[in-house]
Amino acid sequence: MNKRKLPTLEFETSPIALGCMSLKGSLKEDKKVIDAAISGGIDFLDTADLYQKGLNEEIVGSAIRDRRKDITLATKVGNQLRADGNGWDWNPRKAYILEAVEESLKRLKTDYIDLYQLHGGTLEDPWEETLEAFELLKSQGKIRAFGISSIRPNVIRKVLKMSSPATIMMQYSPLDRRPDETAFPMIAASDTRVLVRGAFAKGLLINKSEEAFLEYTASEVKEIRELIADSGLLPEAFLIRFGLLQPAVGSLVIGASSVEQVEKLIFAYQQQEMISDELIREISAKIPLNRYTQHR
């Protein structure tokens, strides 16, 4: 895969990141998935301290331990597990971030994280101390860059005025084009880039039985899926090209839970390189836009 250089990063990333949330929780089996991804050029792994209550980070750390310097490793913070293990609470405070990063480093078996992301965010969060925590960790060499995860234009607008996060993770697909209205133009004009999640829309545009999604009815979802299929393009290839075509987008974070899924993902990436931008725009123009109704 051709690497991408994001404006604020000192390192390049692959255009596809493996979303490790989809891993099954078995080191033996999950390592096969990670190995297949890396062999195919996907050397960008995205996990979080919340996934499987930390087990996900442990598995990722063990799987890449002998090749850490060859991997772009991203994880997330902000969801604090309760002492009794019964759920979690949102905590973007500086003190908690500085404490949580140490635990993530231990589980990941590394002394630095390439991209440390706030796993959410609201307008009411204490952004000054949150961003201060990330800057402190950068100065200490414990993280190389930081990002946030938010679909809220008002939050994104506020954070971009205060800082220059390397990335903002948000949902985007033909069934969720809300970022097109405000978020993407705002981010494209900055040095921040988007990590797209949900690029396959839960499989609804590939092979999953149709169901309602956001403002779209199940029948509308089916119509959009058929529109893509009628183009003759592999649906996964279309969806990858659709996401990577956007100027604000840096990489797509796509989950896989088996070697077969990884292999199909890599094949789809290779296929998308042969799809013209004009064809993607032509098909996209036939899909009704949806817009944010809150957090504007």
Image: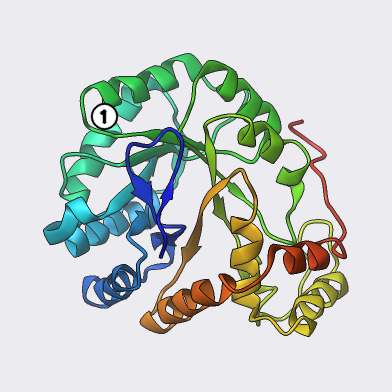
Residue drawn at x 64%, y 56% is: 245
Residue 142's spot in the image, x, y percent? 22, 32
Residue tagged 1: 99
* Quarter of the figure with residue 214: bottom right
Residue drawn at x 31%, y 58% is: 56
Q: Is residue 103 left or right of residue 234?
A: left
Screen quadrant of the N terminus: bottom left
Residue drawn at x 37%, y 53% is: 47
Colour pattern: rainbow
Amino acid type, callout 1: Glu
Residue 102's spot in the image, x, y percent? 21, 35
Q: Secondary structure at mark 1?
A: helix
- Say if 199 sits above or below 186 in the image: below
* Near-viewer residue (4 or 98): 4
Q: Is residue 171 left or right of residue 28?
A: right
**Residue extending farthest left:** 66
Q: Is residue 124 visible?
A: no
Residue drawn at x 63%, y 28% is: 155
Screen quadrant of the C terminus: top right
